[in-house]
Image: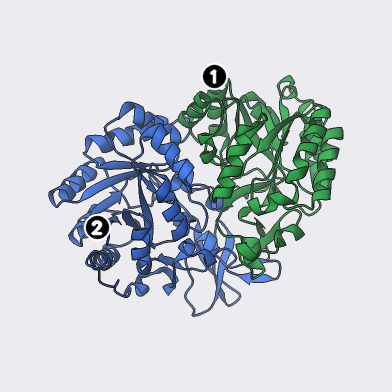
Amino acid sequence: MSGAPMTKDMRLTVGPVLFNWPVETWMDFYARVADEAPVDKVVVGEVVCSKRTPFYEDRILEVVERLQRGGKKVVLASLGLLTTVRERRAAAELFAGEAAVEVNDLTALAWARPGFEVGPLVNVYSEGTLGFLARKGARSICLPPELPFAAVSALAAAAAAVGVDAEVWAYGRIPLAMSARCYHARAHNLTKDSCQFVCGVDPDGLGVDTLDDEAFLTINGVQTMSNSYCSVIGDLEALAGAGVGALRLSPHSGDFVEVARAFRAALDGDLAPEEAQRRLAENAPGAQFSHGFLMGAAGAELLGV
Amino acid sequence: MTMTKRLELVCPAGTPAALRTAVDAGADTIYCGFADETNARNFPGLNFSRDEMAAGIDYAHKRGAKVLVAINTFPRAGAGDFWRKAVADAEARAADAVILADIGLLAHVADQHPKLRLHLSVQAAAANADAINFYAREFGVKRVVLPRVLTVQEIAAINREIDVETEVFIFGGLCVMAEGRCSLSSYATGKSPNMNGVCSPASHVEYREEGGDLASRLGGFAIHRSPQGAPAPYPTLCKGCFRAGDHIGHVFEEPVSLDAAALIPQLADAGVVALKIEGRQRSRAYTEAVVSSFRRAVDAHLAGRPIPASDLRRLTEGQQTTAGAYRKTWR
């Protein structure tokens, strides 16, 4: 089975690392992405918790340069929930720089200049909102992961009409909620202010199971995610047909270059969707995969085997 | 000595009868929505037809109360007209303001309904002064309902940096996530606050006896297990009992509800102008008890008397209350 030519034109984006990885792991991850991953764009920076930023902020420039040398377009991520003065100042400074920046909290529209990008945590559900963001100068929008295909389709058409690139959440645990409270700290009987960075021990987040021992959610500091990994690798033709221009792959531990290669090969028609999904599963042992949101069902609905 | 300002008491009404009850019990302002997916409490049997809305607004206006119409879900792509019509219908029925969350809809109203007063819904999660000033500047928003992620000190700081009014939740259900940015419910059930105006919907709830326990399930996921004979709580997802590593319990939040009555003086000092009671899905009896209790509390504050101890415990979910994020230790 070969992919339709249309999927060949779709681009791959590596989303920001959402977890608290040791800085060396984080550097190694981007070095491999720069050198080996067949992706077009990489979003770099902290989205989840501003307390994590000091561990790697002085290495960001190095990572950006490395990625650019590898031929990747680089976009800087801004924080997903801006509250403190320090967080707001940091975001404003980010938008004052030369680089393209991704808005993850609408607050950042106060500073965004034309050419900004919009991340998946921003509520773009309607053509009206998409049009407003386009008028403000958005050039790329990653749609909210909970959108069903019909909405993705309508918004991708609206985006195309105003010259905005539509991207969808394609791989990885799905961001479901943000809070002022740190659930990682709470699970360790700590508070956010005295968290001891306990989120750092879980490279893919801390699983939340039901009392039936059913895998359900994942805690990542102040963020709550799905336990299942979203995978739309079986839906590429439909997404391309709807006018979606790019797919967002969200970083996880394991061989992430393999993830990017599987998607690229499936898009290029070199790998059948079933085989591509099998590779994703082999690369993330124990992970369950879902695409329920895209199907208009419960997000947790797992991929048929 | 500064004059104490009169705080506005903003009360929920899920039905025309609840609206009349709330007005009679001393509400300054009522908020309610149309009986469809345009509002964030889209529950079966709740909310207002167009005619009921007109009659409710008339009832309130004759008694000096205001009515705010919540159109605070995010318009479904391809169906924007449905939400725009809701706004036009609210204005035509003399609503005192509409409460919106979606920036596309805000832009439309600012452009097409320039005389209609705009309030920013908590569902927009505008959690800092920059965001609020943005909404004020772009759309002429006059009041912002603050998300329940802020401390009293942060609210005071916000009010020093903005010119628009702030309204805060004082009592009722407590979202522990930033509102309007939570897909937990749709992950388990396919129905979300943002798209469908429901959270942990009853249509996806089952109670089942399992091995001597009573399990409350949402979308098939076990949210609680109670030993037989003990009451089984409603399976609101973020108040459920789960296992995270070695921790077993209420991973996100206890089955508590918000009661910040004791903080009324601090909230007033922080510059808040309106106090909001959650619960459009609640009964008339609940509405009457809560509204009259808060009427007494707000009047006591205005008169410089201490806030009466809350007698509302028995009405609250799980019989436990919290001041939530208003106190920093909550985090």
**Which secondary structure, mark 1?**
helix
Mark 1, residues whose alpha carbon is within 10 Å: few (<14), some, or many (≥20)?
few
Quarter that holds the C terminus of chain A: top right
Give me the C-alpha separation between circle 1 and circle 2: 50 Å
Q: Please tell me in which quadrant of the rendered image residue A184 appears.
A: bottom right
Task: Identify the disc placed on residue A161.
Answer: 1
Left or right of A272? Residue A178 is left
> Label 2: how many residues lie within 10 Å, few (<14), some (14-19) or many (20+)?
some
Q: Which residue is at the front of the view, B113 or B74? A: B113
Q: Position of residue A135 (x, y in %)?
A: 50, 24
Is B268 on the left or on the right of A18, as rendered?
A: left
Counting from the top left corner in percent of width and height, residue A125 is at 50, 36
Residue lying at the far front of the rendered structure: B1
Kindly identify which residue carries mark 2.
Answer: B6
* Circle 1: residue type: Ala
In the rendered image, is residue B124 in sight? yes
Name the foreground residue: A220 vs A275: A220
Q: The blue chain is which one?
A: B
Report the mark closest to the observer, 1 or 2: 2
The residue sitting at 25% across, 59% down in the picture is B3
Q: Mark 2 lies on which chain?
A: B
- Describe the element under mark 2 as helix, strand or loop: loop
Colour approach in the figure: by chain
Colour green maps to chain: A
Going by the numbered disc 2, the residue's amino acid type is Arg
Instruction: Tell which subunit mark 1 falls on.
Output: A
In the picture as drawn, the residue positioned furthest to the left comes out as B62
* Residue at 16%, 47% in the rendered image: B61
Left or right for B318, reference A183: left
Does residue B130 appear to the left or right of A160 in the view shown?
A: left
Q: Where residue B2 appears, x then y in whole percent? A: 27, 59
